[in-house]
Image (cartoon, helix red, strand yellow):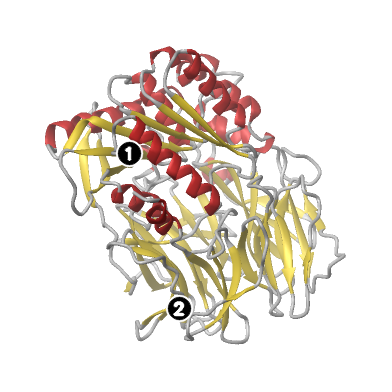
Amino acid sequence: MSKIQIEKYFNINAAGGADYHPKNDDFIFTYNATGIQQVYRQQLNSIFDPEQLTFRDDRCTNPVYLPNGDILYSSDLGGDENFQFHIITENQSYQLTRDLSVKHRFAFVDDEAIYFSANLDDKQRFDLYRYNLPVKEDSDPELLFEGKPQTIITPVASHNNLLLYNIYYGNTHVEPNIFDLESKTNKNLVSKLLGEKEARIYAIDFTDDERLIVLSDLGREFLGISMLSLSTYQLTYLESDNWNTHSVVYDSDRNRIIYAKNIDGMDQLFISELINPLAPIKLQLPDEKGNLVSGDLRSYLRSFVLNSDSNKILMSYACASKVNNIWELEIISSELKQQTFASGPNLPPFIDPELNRFTSFDGLEIPYFIYKPLSTKEPMPTMFIIHGGPEGQITPSFNKIIQYFLSLGIVVVTPNIRGSSGYGRTYLSLDDKDKRLDSMADINTLVKHLQASDPSLDPDKFIIYGGSYGGFAVLSSITEYPDVWAAAIDIVGISNFVTFLSNTAEWRRKLREVEYGSLDEDMETLIRISPIHNINQVKTPTIVIQGDNDERVPLSEALQVFEELKRNGVRTELLRFDDEGHGVVKRKNQLFMYEKIRQFLADCDILDG
């Protein structure tokens, strides 16, 4: 593949994270036409010619309109995730927060204030703040209360001087709380309900003075919509226990909710009056096999928003063969209009996957997607892409990296091994602590399943690829199953859980110990599951990729595994980026990185040179 052809894939653009202007027909969104996310503005139902509003060298994320039409967005430096707030007014732009060592986590805006959390006073503790509106360039935030060390506070809604917020103790333990803005007191809403148990109970919004909408998996497998009484603290489910519900928006004008359900990795969108049980009406999406796209503070938090009249929705949507774009849905008529046309150069049709399942070593059913090139010489090399998290879920959204590897004639397999989200609380916990390597056995069993069932795949050319926790899965797979893999691609992966937990950002350590085990109580397990301690088993050529500014999985994780592989005579390369953090997001770096990967696979005789 020529350099020009490679650039075609990595010049594919994506648009998302839209927000309606509070009064006129404009909307704002993120768009990466410059090679990194910036904030743009566009008029609804017009020719796609967006106005670029930010011109930074680093990503600009999560733009929202303030009630007066000003714009708030976040940006960090070199991928360090120390997000600062910026304001765009009609006449000027300015940086609102200025301590570059602090993480500012935007949450929501109401008519009175901007609510957020930040680790301003203590790097391992997030406190709750607000900027009162209208905000000015020299404004100082008001501290509302101090948070608990090594938890995350996320405010979600306000009502009659009450502030609703969630405390995250871990990925399977979330509790809703209320802060009284007048009395300055906090109240936990579910402590009696939970007792000694843990559950995810996400507060969504107030419906009135007496009730809250929440998403909960207390006493069930899947997250479902329920009501929480503020007088009795009782929880009442409004829907059955099947598939996770997410992205719930409350329409207070009509007392109804709009929400999505993740069904086998693909999204469906519904609307219902707020009754028990719900009476959902399915809403139109651009495709039946895709996803409403959202992320975190590194991109944008909301996959869709309601307009001020509550009759239209702006959504970010993608499927495997459709690039991330923004669409508007008129609720009553079900009319869909594409509002952005982010795309790339002329390329062959993008490829949709097939959803399959296999039976793992202990009888557990594991779902996976398989993508096959349109035409190539068989048998084909195969890349197994393992998602991060580990509580993540890989879905059939558009992924230019997958489409790029397909264009090289590589089959791509994307499993949701045990520990993935989307398949129930039990499934989510099947890889916790001392069960960690069971998920690696899932990958090995999938390899055997495909070797036995699909003769179009070349068993001598299996590649394993992953980032973050997926990078750990890469390193673990080549140490636990060294004879399987022809090449390995480790991106910001964990190589040693002891050094990882010791060196990760202070605010994250306890949250991660819930999943992996603690330094104080689970040292034996942490050592046993760390790939670095079996690194002498590795035979697989391995490329190690790392951003210098990664606070999640620090640079030391990449350096130690690279040095050990090199010392043991294993073919290895290290790619470091001094302007990236947890992952490689800048287009110029992606171009360099994926050309290096292509050449690495050619050097391993997996691809033609």
Is residue 603 visible to the viewer in this orientation of the structure? Answer: yes
Q: Position of residue 197 (x, y in %)?
A: 50, 37
Upstream in sequence: badge 1 or badge 2: 2
In terms of depth relative to the viewer, which is nearer, 515 or 338? 338
Q: Residues within 10 Å of mark 1 (few under 14, many from 20)?
A: few
Q: Give the residue type that dot 2 points to.
A: Gln
Q: Give the residue type that dot 1 points to.
A: Gly
Residue at the image position 61 percent from the left and 19 percent from the top = 520
Q: Is residue 560 left or right of residue 334?
A: right
Residue at the image position 46 percent from the left and 16 percent from the top = 528
Residue highlighted by disc 2: 339
Helix, strand or loop at label 2? It is loop
In terms of depth relative to the viewer, which is nearer, 288 or 481? 481
Q: Is residue 94 above or below residue 201?
A: below
Q: State the image quarter where residue 27 is shown.
A: bottom right
Residue at the image position 57 percent from the left and 18 percent from the top = 521
Residue highlighted by disc 1: 609
Position of the C terminus by quadrant: top left
Q: Residue furthest right?
A: 138
Q: Position of residue 400 (x, y in %)?
A: 39, 54
In terms of depth relative to the viewer, which is nearer, 151 or 491? 491
Q: Is residue 157 above or below residue 556?
A: below
Q: Residues within 10 Å of mark 2 (few under 14, many from 20)?
A: many
Q: Is residue 488 left or right of residue 183?
A: left
Q: State the image quarter where residue 360 is shown.
A: top left
Q: State the image quarter where residue 39 is shown.
A: bottom right
Q: Is residue 281 left or right of residue 152?
A: left
